[in-house]
Image (cartoon, grey):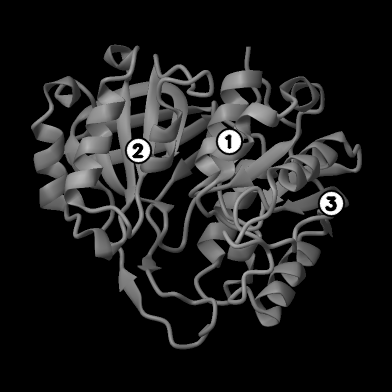
């Protein structure tokens, strides 16, 4: 039984937590923080920061105890409706064995972040049935340029009840913008990549592919039966690792009942192209019956959509046209 947390409204509380990297990362500068705080104020949300959000160690993170404590406190606090992560990193999966899932289940609220947060978000959904969200970090809200599309879909998913269609962004960027907010390079978006036609409806599982793979074979991996997989990878991946990580997911129990695959945009450093992705998909007989598209606005480029892990999506791919809808969120 899934639980969808209450939607956001004016006056709701937001808690910023650091389940992976710390807010004290040197390149998360004051200008960026101030812009992010301003954006939350403009949404009429009451922003607060976890006790240990600035704690930082040799791994640019903090102790497991500190991170778990901040997450538990955020879910326990009745004034908080949105728990948002500072940024991603490498180690949010360290927390999974120490979380009080009954506490989280008893206090359903929005948990939002992406990248390394994929491990945390999918584990919380698997253990509690609480729908979690792949979407912008607190860090993302400090982006001065190109944030409008990200904000539009954040509001569609987290403030509104009605289904919404995902459309391609007009343009996108892969700039490291945190310390140079002005000199940006935006690329015209060539839209969704159609790889296989068809139609499907199913629950959404996914996020960052190599991080999701950390959950394989554990109690924290969601059931992928009847799902539409949303998967992407960042600059540390390349064509061969993306291929083998996808193969690992295909080997998961229940994959034969997966209904569709939606790939997010890969960063240019991966060297992944439409042609390479098509060859990878076509090489796997398990994917032949499934509708498959790529180049959707989620992943490590900007802007990004917000989508519900455990929610429901509908995908129709016919006559070189795509309709991708989030039905339940």
Q: Count the marks: how many?
A: 3
How far apart marks 1 and 3 lie (CA) works out to 25 Å
The dot on residue 155 is: none
Residue under label 3? 10
Say which quarter of the image contains residue 130: top right
Where residue 255 sits: x, y (%)?
A: 31, 17
Q: Nearer the viewer, residue 260 or 236?
A: 236
Q: Is residue 193 visible?
A: yes
Mark 2 or mark 3: which is in front?
Answer: 3
- Which residue is depicted at the point 84% across and 51% down? 10
Q: Nearer the viewer, residue 212 or 168?
A: 212
Q: Quadrant of the C terminus?
A: top right
Residue under label 1? 121
Secondary structure state at the residue bearing disc 2: strand
How far apart marks 1 and 2 lie (CA) works out to 26 Å
Residue under label 2? 323
Q: Nearer the viewer, residue 248 or 283?
A: 248
Circles 1 and 3 in contact, beta carbons < 8 Å: no
Looking at the image, tell me whether mark 1 or mark 3 is earlier in sequence order.
3
């Amino acid at each position: 039984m899934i639980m969808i947390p209450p939607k956001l409204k004016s006056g709701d509380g937001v808690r910023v937590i650091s389940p992976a990297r710390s807010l004290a990362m040197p390149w998360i500068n004051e200008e960026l923080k101030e812009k992010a705080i301003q954006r939350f104020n403009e949404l009429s949300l009451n922003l607060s920061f976890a006790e240990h959000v600035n704690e930082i160690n040799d791994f640019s993170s903090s102790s497991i105890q500190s991170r778990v404590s901040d997450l538990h406190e955020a879910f326990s606090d009745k004034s908080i409706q949105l728990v948002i992560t500072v940024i991603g990193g490498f180690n949010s999966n360290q927390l999974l064995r120490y979380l009080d899932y009954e506490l989280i289940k008893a206090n359903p609220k929005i948990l939002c972040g992406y990248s390394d947060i994929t491990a945390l978000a999918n584990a919380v959904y698997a253990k509690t049935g609480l729908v979690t969200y792949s979407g912008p970090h607190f860090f993302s809200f400090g982006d001065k340029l190109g944030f409008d599309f990200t904000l539009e879909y954040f509001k569609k998913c987290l403030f509104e009840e009605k289904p919404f269609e995902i459309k391609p962004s007009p343009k996108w960027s892969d700039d490291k913008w945190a310390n140079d907010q002005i000199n940006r390079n935006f690329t015209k978006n060539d839209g969704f990549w159609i790889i296989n036609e068809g139609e499907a409806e199913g629950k959404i599982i996914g996020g960052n592919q190599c991080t999701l793979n950390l959950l394989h074979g554990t109690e924290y991996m969601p059931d992928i039966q009847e799902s539409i997989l949303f998967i992407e990878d960042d600059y540390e991946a390349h064509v061969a690792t993306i291929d083998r990580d996808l193969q690992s997911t295909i080997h998961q129990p229940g994959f034969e009942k997966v209904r569709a695959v939606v790939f997010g945009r890969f960063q240019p450093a991966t060297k992944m192209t439409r042609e390479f992705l098509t060859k990878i998909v076509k090489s796997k007989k398990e994917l032949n019956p499934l509708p498959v598209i790529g180049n959707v606005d989620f992943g490590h480029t900007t802007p990004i959509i917000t989508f519900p892990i455990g929610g429901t999506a509908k995908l129709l791919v016919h006559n070189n046209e795509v309709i991708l809808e989030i039905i339940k969120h």
